[in-house]
Every structure is written in C-alpha cells, then in structure tokens.
Amino acid sequence: MGQNIFTNPFKPGAGHMPPYLAGRNSEKDEFVKLIQQKVILENLVLTGLRGVGKTVLLETFKPLAQTNNWRWIGTDLSESTSISEESVALRLITDLSVIASDIVFKKKVVSSMGFGKQTKIVEQKLNYDVLSNLFNSIQGLIADKLKAVLEIVWACMQQEGKFRGVIFAYDEAQTMSDHPQKEQYPLSLILNVFQSIQRKDIPFMLILTGLPTLFPKLVEARTFAERMFRVLFLNRLNKDNSRDAIVKPIEKEDCPVKLSDESLDLIIEVSGGYPYFIQFICKEVYDVFVQQHGCGEPVGVPINEITRKLDNDFFAGRWAKVTDRQRQLLYIIANLPDSDDKEFTVQEVVDKAKKLEISFSSSHVNQMLSTLASKGLIYKNSYGKYSFAVPLLAQFIKRQPKDYLQ
Ligand SMILES: Nc1ncnc2c1ncn2[C@@H]1O[C@H](COP(=O)(O)OP(=O)(O)OP(=O)(O)O)[C@@H](O)[C@H]1O
Ligand SMILES: [Mg+2]
C-alpha cells in the first residue's frame, strides 16, 4: 500500500468511535458481570464529564450484550421525550416494538357472526400499532399500562425462548426530568416501572448514560434509585492508556507519521488524558506532521496553535453563553487549588472571592452556581459539593483575557 492511502485516523467528535478505544477494561468487566444477572438487581448508570467517552463505550457494550443473548434497544433521550409520562411511555413502546415486531403472538378472537359464537386463533405480530393499541386499551395509570405492555411482550418473547432479556440503553439521560408543576413525572415513571417489572423477575435492564448531573437527579426523583443502579464514573485515561490511544492508531507500517517520545509526552500532558482532547490534538498533529514531513523540516508539535484551536472549537461556545458576573465567579473557582480535578464548596468559593477582592455573598454564590449548572458548566454531586462539568475548564479560564474583572 502506498503512503497516501493511510488517512488521518483520529476522530474528535461526539459519539465517533475512536481508531483505538484505550483502557476501559474494568468498566467492560463490570458490564459483563451485570449481564450475567438472572434476576436484575442492578441496572447501570454510565456517567462522566463531557467528551470522556460515555457514548462510544456504550456502543461497545452493545455487541458484548448481543453475543450474550441479550436484545438491545435504545436511543438518545431529549428534553422533548420527557415532557410527559405518556411521551416517555410511547418512547419505550416505540423502542420495544423494534425487537417485538419479530414476535408472533397468538390471539383468541371470538366472533358472533351467524349462529352462536366462534373462536379462532389469529396470529399477530407485535408491531408498534399492536403495542400502542394494547397500551391504549388498558385502563388505569400510565405506569400500569406500560407495565402491562412490557409484561405481555416478555411473555411472548419467552415463548420463543431465544433471549436472556432486553437492555434498554438511553444516552443523554440527564435531559430527563420530572415536572411537578405540570403534575408530570416521566423520570419517576421509568424508575417505578423498571423496579416493578424487575421484581417480577422480568429481565429488562436499564442503562442510562449522561453527564454527572444524571445520578443525583435519579436519586432525587426516587430515593430507591440509589440501590437500583451500579454507577460507573468514567475518568480521564491514565498515562499508559493515553499513550495507547495516541500511538496504536499510527503504529502501522504504512503510516507516514511517527511521534517522538517528547511529542507523545506533550500530547499526554496537554490533553490531560481526556479522550476528546486526545483525538482533537492528535488529528491536528497528524495533519501538521504529514505536511512537515514533505518538507524535510524537523518535526515538532505546534501546541500553542492547537490549544488556540481547541479553545475556539470546544470552549469558546460555552464561554460565550456566560455573563461577566458569572465569569467572575468561574474565575474565582478556576483559581481554587486543582479545581479541574477537585470538588469545591460554596464556603471555599466565598473565601477565595474575599482573597481576590471580588465581592460575592454565599447566597449569591449558591444562586449563581445553580444557574451555571443549568448551563452545563458546573454540577452538584449527591453530597452537595460542586465540580466543573467541563474537563480542563480551569486551565481554559486562566488562558483567557480577564477584561470581565474590571
Ligand atoms: N477510550 C477511548 N480511547 C480513545 N478515544 C476515545 C475513548 N473514548 C472516547 N474517545 C474519543 O473521545 C471523543 C468523545 O467520545 P464520546 O462522544 O463517547 O464522549 P461522551 O462522554 O459521550 O461525550 P458527551 O458528554 O459530549 O456526550 C470521541 O472523539 C471518541 O472517539
Ligand atoms: Mg455522549
């Protein structure tokens, strides 16, 4: 193969499968344990900061489940899915119908044409229309209707005897919410329904993936959620795994790019081991190296230019959405020791504000942190401490002009 056939392998982009998925072995092992359950006692929450690799890991769980005889369904959730209990129920039914429509269901039909009654058996496929008619024909609360549909589908699937169970996998699940002011509790509905059918030994397992706000949100909706889920918090990659993510895709004979140890260390350091940043930086480095290669010039990583591009592509949009006053607060947090890695409390922020001579009361900080949380920049964990929700945000803030401080 000629050199120009080898194309840039790196894939920065939400949900794009990397050329080499580094690390994550312990998470895969945990997942394999979960799918050995006969009775579902634990479901899965897969969580972590933006760009840490939740979606692509979920994608790699799918074939693992399928080779273990699970059926797999699911999609991305959005705020519109969780507008009402009915919309969530229909979402689940729609997803279920994708696999249920293979199943033939025998139905007794009693007709009273002519003299007397006749009973015949009609075969029907469990497609969306059948399932939604069934849902609508059942009386009662939405939760009861949905449970009944799920139970019937499982009873029919069992007759086929081929499958171990069904995994309902939903990404971006942090967008789900209950809406007490409208008396709609779609998030609680999902939790209630799965808990109830799992108690009846129906092997339907729930996987929810999303930002770190997700799990606290589930527990807030239903305290039993704490016991219902195994939580896998994806962290940045360690040094060895970061190295693999960078080197494995280009360790091929026909790849025109080679990295020195120096370049490699620099990429590991600047990316902080965050998968999206690794893909982003490597893609840029690859292009630069291919060009430099042709000129016979010594090859180096133009890290300042790449960082500027990353700031522009990844951070600038989020930064543009915050007011000057909010920037001041984020600046204070960025200047707490290690705030890219460590949690912080309101009190720590207030103390730091005093030191930096920027005036903020604790009620003010509290209020503003929740606004920043709704903008996806901060999150509050279940113990009431806060963290940045965007990786390496403190470093970005420190690189920016500080005109908002005047
Ligand atoms: N283990 C890994 N090794 C190498 N690259 C990875 C790994 N995991 C993810 N990536 C890369 O990181 C980027 C982000 O991955 P992904 O979209 O799965 O993250 P995410 O956590 O779902 O992000 P978001 O919070 O925005 O939904 C992608 O470009 C992907 O190819
Ligand atoms: Mg994702």
Image (cartoon, rainbow, N blue to C red):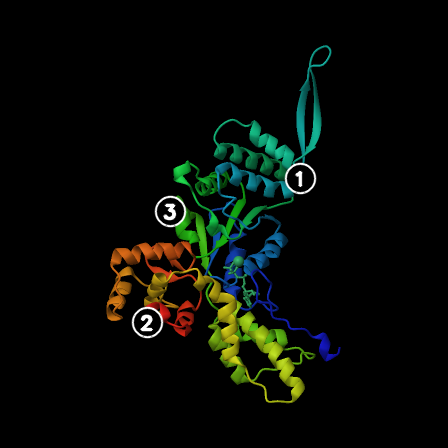
- Residues 97 and 37: in front is 97
Q: Position of residue 45 (x, y in %)?
A: 47, 53
State if disc 2 and disc 1 touch (CB < 8 Å): no
Mark 3 vs ligand 1: CB under 8 Å? Answer: no
- Residues 129 and 43: in front is 129
Residue beneath label 1, please?
101
Q: Is residue 393 left or right of residue 15?
A: left
Residues at marks 3 and 1, CA–CA distance in whole angstroms: 35 Å
User: Amino acid type of disc 2?
Assistant: Pro
Q: Is residue 249 left or right of residue 148?
A: right
User: Amino acid type of disc 3?
Assistant: Glu
Residue beneath label 3, please?
220
Which is more foreground, mark 1 or mark 2? Answer: 2
Which is more foreground, mark 3 or mark 1? Answer: 3
Q: Position of residue 146 (x, y in %)?
A: 53, 35
Q: Position of residue 5 (x, y in %)?
A: 72, 75
Residue that appears at 60% across and 34% down? 132
Residues at marks 2 and 3, CA–CA distance in whole angstroms: 30 Å
Mark 1 vs ligand 2: CB under 8 Å? Answer: no
Q: Earlier in the sequence, mark 1 or mark 2?
A: 1
User: Amino acid type of disc 1?
Assistant: Ser
Q: Any mark on residue 55, and which?
A: none
Up-down: is 198 above or below 317?
above
Q: Secondary structure at mark 1?
A: loop
Residue that appears at 40% across and 60% down? 322
Q: Earlier in the sequence, mark 2 or mark 3?
A: 3
* Residue 51 in view (yes/no): yes
* Residue 275 in view (yes/no): no
Residues at marks 1 and 2, CA–CA distance in whole angstroms: 56 Å
Q: Earlier in the sequence, mark 3 or mark 1?
A: 1
Q: Any mark on residue 337, and which?
A: 2
